[in-house]
Image (cartoon, rainbow, N blue to C red):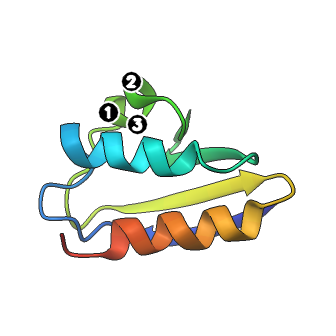
Amino acid sequence: MAEKTVEVNMKTGLQARQAALFVQEANKFTADVFLKKDERQVNAKSIMGVMSLAVARGTTVSLIAEGVDEEQAIERLAQLVENEN
């Protein structure tokens, strides 16, 4: 299992379009991927789960992955949310 804590720097956080891009990227990996904010943890491959966290810019979240490509999944998703687009 791999885990990384990151700060979300996307201009609008993980809302609508950015959440959809995040979920699309997470679905490229075979590992189980989760997004954790405070005490809530959701499946990062679920658009409804990701949006339910209401992650705003500047929020600190944890990316958790378990599977054969867990390290790659964590690194790619971390790059995505830390980017200021």
Name the residue carrying label 1.
51
- In the displayed orientation, state which residue is furthest to the right: 68
User: Residue 30 placed where, x, y %?
Assistant: 75, 45
Q: Do the residues labelled 1 and 2 touch (CB within 8 Å)?
A: yes
Q: How crowded is mark 2: few (under 14 residues within 10 Å), some or many (20 or more)?
A: some
**Quarter of the image containing the N terminus?**
bottom right
Circle 1: element type:
helix
Horizontally, is 70 left or right of 57 in the view?
A: right
Amino acid type shown at disc 1? Met
Horizontally, is 43 left or right of 1 in the view?
A: left
User: Residue 76 placed where, x, y %?
Assistant: 54, 69
Looking at the rendering, which quadrant does residue 68 occupy? bottom right
Q: How far apart are marks 2 and 3 (CA)?
A: 6 Å
Amino acid type shown at disc 2? Met
Per the rendering, the mark at residue 48 is 2
User: Residue 84 placed where, x, y %?
Assistant: 20, 75
Residue 7, can we see it? no
Name the residue carrying label 3.
50
Looking at the rendering, which quadrant does residue 79 occupy? bottom left
- Front residue of this view, candidates 61 and 49: 49
Q: How many labels does the image show?
A: 3
Residue 32, can we see it? yes
Q: How crowded is mark 3: few (under 14 residues within 10 Å), some or many (20 or more)?
A: many
Q: How far apart are marks 1 and 2 (CA)?
A: 5 Å
| Residue in the picture at 44% in, 59% down | 61
| Residue in the picture at 24% in, 71% down | 9
Amino acid type shown at disc 3? Val
